[in-house]
Image: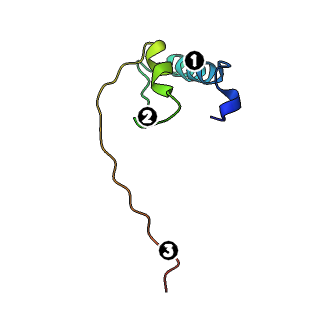
């Protein structure tokens, strides 16, 4: 999210919309994956809304040069 939008309730409104949509579709839960190293402090938003960490994983990434000759 753009830093000018932070603190204005945009993320919370989006999450509430997703939760409401899931409930309307008969879903019993909503899952969210978060970068634990995020500098935005998003995890504070999620915990304030009652989200709980279910498990932690590690992701490994490697960039590849697709234009190599």
Give me the residue at 66% from left, 32% from top: 3
Task: State left or right for residue 9 relative to residue 41.
Answer: right
**Labels 3 and 2: the sequence-earlier one:** 2
State the CA–CA distance, disc 2 to disc 1: 17 Å
Closest to the camera, between mark 3 and mark 1, is 3
Q: Report whether residue 15 is seen.
A: yes
Q: Residue at x 71, y 30 (%)?
A: 4
For image coordinates 57% across by 17% down, the residue present is 16
Residue 46 relative to residue 17: left or right: left
**Colouring:** rainbow
Is 6 left, or right, of 61 in this rendering? right
**Of the image marks 2 and 1, the number of the one nearer the N terminus:** 1
The location of residue 37, given as percent across then percent down, is 42, 37
Q: Which mark is residue 66?
A: 3
For the residues bearing labels 3 and 2, Cβ distance under 8 angstroms: no
Q: CA distance from mark 3 to mark 1?
A: 39 Å
Return the x and y of residue 38 as percentages of the image width and height: 47, 36
* Residue wearing tag 1: 16
Q: Which residue is mark 2?
A: 34
């Amino acid at each position: 999210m753009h830093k000018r939008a932070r603190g204005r309730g945009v993320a919370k409104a989006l999450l509430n919309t997703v939760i409401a949509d899931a409930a309307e579709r008969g879903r019993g839960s909503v899952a969210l994956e978060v970068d634990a190293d995020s500098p935005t402090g998003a995890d504070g938003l999620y915990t304030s809304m009652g989200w709980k960490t279910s498990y932690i994983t590690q992701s490994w990434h490697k960039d590849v040069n697709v234009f190599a000759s």
